[in-house]
Image (cartoon, rainbow, N blue to C red):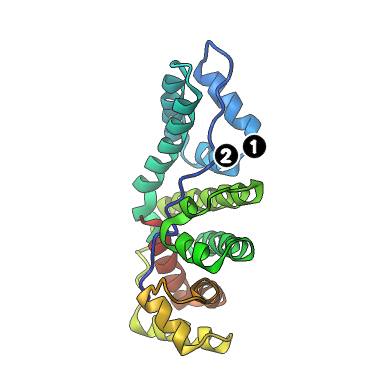
Amino acid sequence: MPTMFGGGRHHHYQSVEMPPQPVTTADIDAEIRKQDLQIFEAIAREFPDDYDAMLRKINAAAQTGNQTEVRNASRQAVADLRHRYVPLLPSAPDSNVSEALSAQLDMLNHVMARETPATCNNYLRNGPDAISAPGHDFRADLDRIGATLFRAFAAAKRSGLPAAVPSDQDWSLVADVFTKIGGTPAEMEAISNANQDFPGLCPAMARFYEAALVMHGEPGWHIKSALLYAIVKN
């Protein structure tokens, strides 16, 4: 299995703006829904009790009157929920895993298009913190990643599926697909070793995600689940 790194460390840049004082949880909820962010919509729909608890935490921060406190509380609340539910991810159905991995690939492609190879490699290791000036499109990608993850967490809770564990044969199959779509032995080695000094690491990783996404059946589900879990577990 390839050694993966910290691209899942997504400290969602989406955060709640503070409504006028005095503030209630209803005000916070209205402010969140006004922003029309997919991640909060997914949490509210799939984890309503957690969403209500998050509103209470953000509301408590809002009583300070400090916008930074409100932003930090909303980001921390999302991060805490993600860490709580990440262990469920290997039991998420293939369709949800594919959706979430596709969102990761879209983000990686956008980072490759806009940043230097060194910054992109750093993104693979450290996630969004590697991007010094995230634009609107970047935040939209992050929002989609977050929403697909929470939908996958919810589907995993409902699925009753055993955890997907790739076999050596599964990894051999994805390596074959990777080669067929243009991957090289040098790229495969760089992925396996998480070689940050390899100049083409981001394109190689994007191709590896593509190879996983075109795989079908149980082997494809196993590989996609393992890749997604490796990305977001940090």
230 is higher (above) or lower (below) than 154: below
In percent of width and height, residue 107 lies at 58, 59
Task: Please state which of residues 232 and 187 is positioned toward the viewer in this rendering.
Answer: 187
Residue 234 image-quadrant placement:
bottom left
Which numbered disc, 1 or 2, marks the residue that appears first in the sequence? 1
Q: Give amino acid for label 2.
A: Glu
Q: Give amino acid for label 1.
A: Asp
Seen at 52% across and 83% down, the residue is: 178
**10 Å crowding of disc 2: few (<14), some (14-19), many (20+):** some
Q: Quadrant of the N terminus?
A: bottom left
Q: Secondary structure under badge 1?
A: loop
The answer to whether residue 10 is visible is yes
Q: Are marks 1 and 2 in contact (CB under 8 Å)?
A: yes
**10 Å crowding of disc 1: few (<14), some (14-19), many (20+):** few
Task: Please state which of residues 197 and 75 is positioned toward the viewer in this rendering.
Answer: 197
- The answer to whether residue 179 is left or right of residue 82 is right
Residue marked by disc 2: 41
In percent of width and height, residue 26 lies at 54, 20
- The answer to whether residue 44 is left or right of residue 6 is right
Q: Secondary structure under badge 2?
A: helix
Residue 7 image-quadrant placement:
bottom left
Q: Which mark is residue 36?
A: 1
In percent of width and height, residue 114 lies at 63, 61
